Amino acid sequence: VFTRSAEVVEKAITDVKPDIVISVGQAGGRSALTVEKVAINLAEARIPDNDGEQPLDQPLREDGDTAYFATIPVKAMVANVRAHELPAFVSYTAGTFVCNSVMYNVLYLLDRKFPGVRGGFIHVPYASQQVVGKSNGTPFMPLPDIAKSLEYAIEAAVTDDGSAVEGAMGETH
């Protein structure tokens, strides 16, 4: 999936010609929607992906920048979700597994081949149905709340006028 996802994303951007690319992935240990701020040029997997790839300390792109920052209005997206009384945070790491790979490759492609297109990544927690049988205290959100949070985040990405959102919005860990 590390390799294949980059190819799928490039084809989709070429075919659709979007104004914004927002990818979504799941981070089962998180308790709220998190909008990612940065993706790093590193693949490190403690387990194999669905294609059996398990890179260790490898760059995603030999010719890529060390990191790319999201070009969507991360803080405005978080603020809009919170304005609707749903939990959301800025995250400053997409990790080193497939979600980071997707975000990094999207931003790399937008920088190199699709100028003017904005991009970023949103992590969602487990839905409540997914924690059945998991250890007590496993974080989750009800699926309707996840869907509404995504709607509010995307709404802000589309409508934000570029005005600065004040204050820190990251998690404390």
Image (spheres, helix red, strand yellow):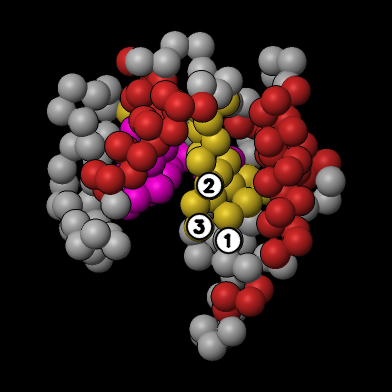
- x and y percent of residue 120 in the render? 51, 33
Q: Which residues are magenta?
A: 90-105
Q: Using residue 9 as the reference point, say whether residue 154 is left or right of it.
A: right
Residue drawn at (51%, 27%) of the image: 16
Q: CA distance from mark 3 to mark 1?
A: 6 Å
**Dot 3 amino acid type:** Gln
As drawn, the label of residue 26 is 3
Q: Which residue is mark 2?
A: 24
Q: Residue at point 50% right, 65% down?
A: 28
For numbered disc 1, what is the local secondary structure?
A: loop
Left or right: 48 as drawn, with respect to 22: left
Separation of disc 3 and disc 2 at Cα?
Answer: 7 Å
Q: Are marks 3 and 1 in contact (CB under 8 Å)?
A: yes
Question: Is residue 79 visible from the viewing direction of this image?
Answer: no
Residue sitting at the far right: 84
How packed mark 1 is, by other alpha carbons closer than 10 Å (few <14, some 14-19, many 20 or more), is: many
- Residue 104 covered by magenta stretch: yes
- Residue 2 lies left or right of residue 121; in this view the side is left
Q: Position of residue 26 (x, y in %)?
A: 50, 57
